[in-house]
Image (tube, rainbow, N blue to C red):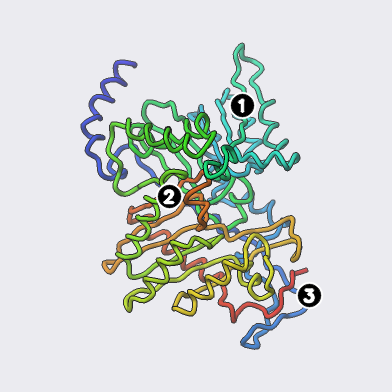
Amino acid sequence: MALLRIFIFLFLIPYLSYAKSITEIAPFNYEVVFTNPKCKKHFYKKPLINSYGQEIHFKTEGAYCTPSDNSALNKQKGNPHDKIIKWIKEPSTQEVFMTYLSFSKSSVIKELCKAVKTRNLKLTILIDEKNRENQKRMNKVLKLKSCINSNLDKPSTPVVLTGGHQGEGDNQTGYAHTKLILINPSSPDQVKIVFSSGNMSSGTTSHHENWHFLTTHRNTYFFQAHLCLKEGLLKHQSSKSSFITFMSDCQKQIKLPPEDDLKVFFIPGDGRKAMKSLHQEFKKSIDVKMAAHRFSNGSIIRAIKKNLERTNFQAKIIVDDDIYWTGLLQTNIGRNTLYEFEKLTMLESLGLNIKYLETFADNIENPKSIQLQHNKFLIFTREDHNGTVFTGAGNLTGAAFYKNFENFYLISIPEVHQKFLKQYDYLSSLSRSSKELPLKLELPW
């Protein structure tokens, strides 16, 4: 068997060495899965009025979800949560590395525990250091450390680590904001990888997110780069410079060419490269459709402003309605700021089309439970109707490109581009313009 694997690897080396598209390398399967929660209508006690004088009786069905919807969403077929559970359950899944800002999805934790106990799954989880400030949340994921296969002499013990917020001054790292699953990273051939906009939380079900499930070969630049990321996050994140130096050296040692249609940017380190790619995509495109949770990156704002001056260019964006209410009430709402509202309003005056997706909060002034429009993506389309998608873990902020630990992707696979365009249309159908929103902020009963 060992000789057969060596033969297969040697046979594949010339083929892999010259592959320009990850789609040409077997195995290959790429599925984009959007949360698209199926939630019931939530009615107001009394109808509200919008700027057109129209009565609004309920929050938009399919957009607005409350904790009362969670049980049904956990059972919803075809969403990211469903796919994650299936991949964990597969008998071939023997090793898993996960890293997220937060990790609180009980059903996923339960399935991971079961896999450790029954299959001796090797499990490593890295989350942000600030989770330690929430003992209840931290204890939930720490329970995994007690999941052990007691029938074995040397059982695998799950490892739970925290990261981010290390170093000093300008060399200090930000949030451990990377969102990633590596399945069987030690496999000599087939591997699986999951990257997303969402955390291992309600980001799998009720937040509005995009998740990417890729099956590929270990000997692709794309996967080898993620192995560098894994080691960098586990062993070299004491400061920005330490991580950047390691990641640069590690990726230079990969003896495979980067694939043209699935490019990755790891932050800190690749921020300038990622931003340069974004500006190039803006310049080549005639249409850009965006979705954002946070929106404050000056370079992206300038790129939108500059390209809106072109007569053959149009841009649209979908954001959380918290940004709209932040501007209307002149106070920060949810996790959005007045600065974001002001920048979007400025761009709207120049031609940017803005729509707002209504999301849940349990309290207007001091919410403790919230739902988010958490997608972060830019869909670029050229005159020939082809294009790219830029997406990943990070928000459209400065910290996401230069300080936090993040993973961004520039995707040129036509099927992915088309799927995002279709998803944008769906999100747009759930969203409202500022004039279509109620004149008054009230929570349904």
Cα distance between the residues tagged 1 and 3: 48 Å
Q: Using the rendered view, name the quadrant where residue 304 is placed.
A: bottom left
Q: Quadrant of the C terminus?
A: bottom right
Cα distance between the residues tagged 2 and 1: 32 Å
Above/below status of 278 relative to 355: above
Q: Nearer the viewer, mark 1 or mark 3?
A: 1
Which disc is residue 271 wearing? Answer: 2
Q: If you read the primary sequence from the N terminus, does the residue marked by circle 2 or circle 1 appear first? A: 1
Do labels 2 and 3 touch, CB within 8 Å?
no
Amino acid at circle 3: Lys
Amino acid at circle 2: Gly
Q: Quadrant of the N terminus?
A: top left
State the residue in front, 263 or 445: 263
Query: Is 154 left, or right, of 132 in this rendering?
Result: left
Above/below status of 59 relative to 158: below
State the residue in front, 303 or 220: 303
Helix, strand or loop status at disc 1: loop
Query: Is 197 left, or right, of 59 in this rendering?
Result: left
Identity of the residue drawn at 73% across and 35% down: 139
Q: Nearer the viewer, mark 2 or mark 1?
A: 2
Q: Is residue 358 visible?
A: no
Query: What residue would you read off at disc 3?
Result: 45
Cα distance between the residues tagged 2 and 3: 47 Å
Structural crowding at the residue carrying mark 3, measured as other residues with C-alpha within 10 Å and reported as few (<14), some (14–19) or many (≥20) = few
Query: What residue would you read off at disc 1?
Result: 158
